Image (tube, helix red, strand yellow):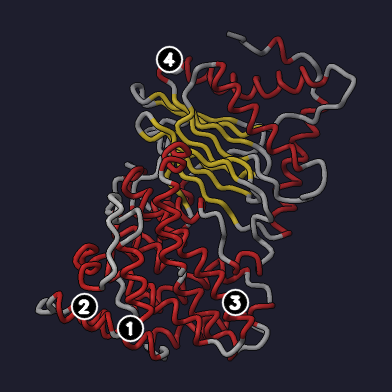
């Protein structure tokens, strides 16, 4: 099926949903994710026509500890998990292109959450620049939640800024906070799983 | 108040063509009909436009803006301005005047002020859409300009009718951003005789999914709407405004970034926005 010919509502209906902390590669089936302060990165190799998407955030940094290093490693883990999986399926790193979305502030405007989205967005841009993967399109920050659709066979991405009422904001925030809690509790053994390059 | 029922009533009224425009808009509607007449000459059109001071001022103002007059040769008469702009741009300007006149339809000063802010947003979106079409999405700049001018027409009509439904604009307008805007907007756009390609672009705007990179006329409009420095005041009423927060949206266009293109086109956008706002 050529998903790129379908209206976005139909793509959304047929898509596989990716939750916070997860990543996925599909040969054809569209991928979708709902973002608050988290970021989603779509990576695509236009020659091999292989693509995937992740959904992650950096855990909170506490001053006076080594957690800032852990925090960055956690972000790098999310990116490298997707990158490695794409390379294993035949993608070439030099051909990869990125599109990235999210980092919004959907609740607690005046609170510390203000900077979470910004930190996630900045990390994403820095990581991609360091890995020399061009960022073709990005929509970061602002007060919106976002729905992202990605077609892994064509690399097409669609981003919808969403009007976020209090109930939706709380649902997204709860899901993201649940994910954030798992990041804080995660034992420091991730280095064994990371293939750094 | 059942907002959904009110929105359905307003949409049904618009669909029946029950829109009463003020005097100035009536003249603009006559100009619009003349533009649809294949036998209408430049002379006839210029005479008709010259009879309507707001439209005349806008036609001359836009013809002298940087966007249409990069060489800076100013002109002051309607006929030369009409000749420079062409019929497609004129159609946009006539529609702009009709929509602007919808502001006068409300008896409430508060609502008229709201419509004034909505026009400011509209002017920014139309100007940005024209530049984005030309330099980013390679769409027809005049079609994008027109789509920008009419994209909030449903909201203008809502404000114009709000006095008939006390409390409407202070109630929760979440349904407006959901299905209401599309319901009312579709009816008003059809009543105004907006062409199918423009309707498709506005449907894309209501759908809300921006293709990244942007390609279609709908993407052009959606991107302009997202980049406009002032948003629709209805978004603020809804408690869903940007609240002063900036967004960081960018695209690679060929070898250039969208942000660089927009910085480069700032004067063109400003001149067009100012000419529309006046």
Answer yes or no: are tags 2 and 3 on the same subunit.
yes
Q: Residue B52 carries which label?
A: 1
Element under disc 4: helix
* Residue position marked by numbered label 2 in the rendering: B46
Element under disc 3: helix
Mark 4, chain letter? Answer: A
Tags 1 and 4 touching, CB below 8 Å: no
Classify 10 Å Cα crowding around label 3: few (below 14), some (14-19), many (20 and above).
Answer: some
Dividing the picture into quadrants, the one containing residue A50 is: top left
* Residue position marked by numbered label 4 in the rendering: A94
Mark 1–mark 4 Cα distance, whole angstroms, equals 61 Å
The answer to whether residue A29 is visible is no
Coordinates of residue B229 in the picture (x, y in percent)? 55, 54
Q: Is B113 or B222 nearer to us in this picture?
A: B113
Q: In which quarter of the image is the C terminus of chain A?
A: top right
**Side (left or right) of A69 relative to A126:** right
Answer yes or no: are tags 1 and 3 on the same subunit.
yes
Answer yes or no: are tags 1 and 4 on the same subunit.
no
Q: Is A196 or B74 nearer to us in this picture?
A: B74
Position above or below: A103 against A68: below
Residue drawn at 45 percent across, 36 percent down: B260
Element under disc 2: helix
Position above or below: B160 against A130: below
Mark 2–mark 3 Cα distance, whole angstroms, equals 31 Å
Mark 2–mark 4 Cα distance, whole angstroms, equals 59 Å
Q: In which quarter of the image is the N terminus of chain A?
A: top left
């Amino acid at each position: 099926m050529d998903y790129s010919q379908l209206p976005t509502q139909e793509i959304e209906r047929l898509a596989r949903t990716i939750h916070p902390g997860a990543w996925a590669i599909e040969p054809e089936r569209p991928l979708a994710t709902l973002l608050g302060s988290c970021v989603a990165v779509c990576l695509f190799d236009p020659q091999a026509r292989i693509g995937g998407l992740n959904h992650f955030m950096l855990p909170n940094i506490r001053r006076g500890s080594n957690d800032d290093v852990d925090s960055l490693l956690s972000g790098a883990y999310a990116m490298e998990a997707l990158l490695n999986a794409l390379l294993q399926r035949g993608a070439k790193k030099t051909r990869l292109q990125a599109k990235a979305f999210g980092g919004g502030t959907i609740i607690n405007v005046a609170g510390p959450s203000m900077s979470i989205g910004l930190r996630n967005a900045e990390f994403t841009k820095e990581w991609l620049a360091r890995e020399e993967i061009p960022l073709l399109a990005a929509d970061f920050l602002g007060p919106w939640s976002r729905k992202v659709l990605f077609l892994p066979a064509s690399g097409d991405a669609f981003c919808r800024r969403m009007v976020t009422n209090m109930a939706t904001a709380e649902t997204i925030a709860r899901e993201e906070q649940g994910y954030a809690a798992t990041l804080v509790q995660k034992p420091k053994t991730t280095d064994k799983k990371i293939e750094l390059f | 108040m059942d907002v959904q029922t009110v929105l359905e009533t307003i949409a049904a009224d618009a669909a029946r063509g029950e829109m009463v425009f003020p005097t100035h808009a009536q003249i603009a509607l006559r100009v619009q009909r003349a533009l649809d007449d294949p036998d209408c000459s430049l002379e006839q059109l210029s005479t008709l436009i010259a009879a309507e001071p707001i439209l005349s001022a806008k036609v001359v103002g836009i013809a002298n803006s940087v966007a249409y007059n990069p060489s800076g040769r100013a002109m002051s008469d309607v006929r030369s301005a009409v000749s420079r702009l062409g019929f497609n741009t004129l159609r946009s300007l006539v529609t702009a005047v009709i929509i602007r006149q919808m502001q006068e339809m409300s008896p409430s000063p508060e609502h008229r002020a709201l419509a004034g802010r909505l026009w400011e947003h509209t002017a920014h979106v139309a100007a940005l859409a024209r530049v984005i079409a030309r330099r980013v999405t390679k769409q027809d700049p005049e079609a994008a300009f027109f789509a920008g001018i009419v994209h909030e027409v449903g909201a203008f009509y809502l404000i114009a009718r709000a006095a008939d439904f006390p409390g409407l604009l202070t109630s929760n307008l979440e349904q407006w951003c959901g299905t209401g805007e599309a319901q009312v907007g579709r009816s008003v756009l059809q009543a105004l005789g907006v062409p199918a390609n423009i309707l498709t672009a506005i449907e894309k705007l209501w759908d809300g999914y921006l293709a990244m990179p942007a390609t279609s006329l709908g993407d052009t409009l959606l991107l302009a709407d997202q980049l406009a420095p002032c948003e629709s005041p209805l978004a603020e009423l809804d408690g869903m405004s940007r609240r002063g927060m900036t967004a960081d949206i960018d695209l690679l266009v060929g070898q250039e970034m969208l942000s660089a293109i927009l910085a480069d086109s700032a004067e063109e956008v400003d001149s067009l926005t100012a000419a529309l706002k006046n």
